[in-house]
Image (spheres, grey):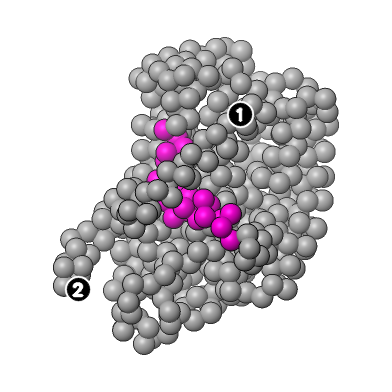
Amino acid sequence: MADGEDPDATIGPQRSTDGRDPPRARAQSPSPPARIDAIDALRGFALVGILFINITSMGGPIESERPVGPPVLADPDWLVWVSSHLFVYGSMRGIFSMLFGASALLFLRDASRSRALFARRCFWLLCFGALNGTVLLWPGDILLIYALASPVILLALDAPPRRLVAGAIALLLLFWAWQYGLHATESGATADAPDAALVLAEEQAARLGGYLDNLRFMSAVSYDWTFTPHVVPWILDAAAFMLVGMALFRAGVLSGTASTALYRKFAVIGMGVGLPIRAWETLLAWNAGGEFPPVTTLTTQFGRLAVTLGWIGLFMLAWRLAPWRAVFEPLRALGRMAFTGYLLQSVLAALIFSGFGLGLWGRLDWLQMWGLVPVIMLPMALAFMAWLRVFRMGPLERLWRWLTLGPARRRVIRAR
């Protein structure tokens, strides 16, 4: 899941360290600005990480969140499951949500861009999300969720970092309340659940069938996942992390301009707090056959936020190592074209796993599916690097920009 690349995620030479533009910087329209390379590379890192999470549902039962069979340490698939929940699950999405909040500030830094224009941008994002969840056969799309959560950005656009963090905490409290309400109302409803073997057989027939079979099945899943009370926690969780991202950007954390000591604190405290929480939750789920008990709802967002901040700290510390900077070029290319890359992941997964493609659905275990991630992402990164040597942005980034800015933008370009 991804927030998509913001084609205008750039930073001008007169930008202030808090992420806000000085009044004169807006009026002068300086020469073509340079991108924020650290944000691009971080976005690319998260794009790779998110595929590690999504690919098990792309290549196996879409509702399944754990390997087949009881938890066993000798089973590599369960080791993948443990690694996923400790280090990856939720934290890559957390980075994307934070970067979405930061990209909103970048988009609106231009005085000519109104809140109505940002709302138009998010409307088209919602359309792309609906397309991804149906035509591109990925009901796990996050773009639609981001579009639905985006109003919180406009409400908090001028808020200082402390208020943004307070708003994020309030949204997470609503998240917990909603989750517990859902659990209370749905407890005991499992007796009416359909036969699991029948459901799996129906999914197998659809996903190993032709495109129309997949389209009917995936569209129904996407509809069920969207028009349900369960979508509300996803929106609240995304909105909360967007506010945190706005606060971090204004503090210079996401743009790579904060102190090394601060990034070290993020890494040590984030992982030091988050990993024990996640280890406790994973142990409870392990003992319950892979099912996370309701009590983990109280801690999961704390652990997720901490690990997300820990990853940001570790990444920015690595970014500071100048001799290693060339290693980040593939990630930077993925980050610059993350909108294209995210939707391309759906297309490639459909071609690999569906019956109208290679038909590998249900034939690979979790470890093998994780092994596919570098096979998919490395060629994608190399292709994006080649593309960016010729073009300034990706094809879908350009389309999104055109749909958002429209004729008004074209007139400005001609005037220049």
Choose top left, top right, bottom left or bottom right for residue 215: top left
Residue 98 x, y percent position in the rendering: 55, 59
Q: Which residue is mark 1?
A: 369
Residue 380 x, y percent position in the rendering: 46, 41
Does residue 287 show up? Answer: yes
Give the number of callouts: 2
Give SS at disc 1.
helix
Residue 354 x, y percent position in the rendering: 46, 21
- In the shown orientation, is residue 96 left or right of residue 132? right
- In the shown orientation, is residue 147 left or right of residue 65? left
Residue neighbourhood size for the residue with mark 1, other residues' Cα within 10 Å, grouped as few (<14), some (14–19), many (≥20): many
Q: Which residues are magenta?
A: 325-347
In the picture shown, does residue 179 fall above or below 166? above
| Magenta span includes 344 | yes
In the picture shown, does residue 356 fall above or below 178? above
Which secondary structure class fits the magenta region best? helix
Classify the position of the C terminus by image quarter. Answer: bottom left
**Which amino acid is tagged 2?**
Arg
Does residue 228 show up? Answer: no
- In the shown orientation, is residue 342 left or right of residue 411? right
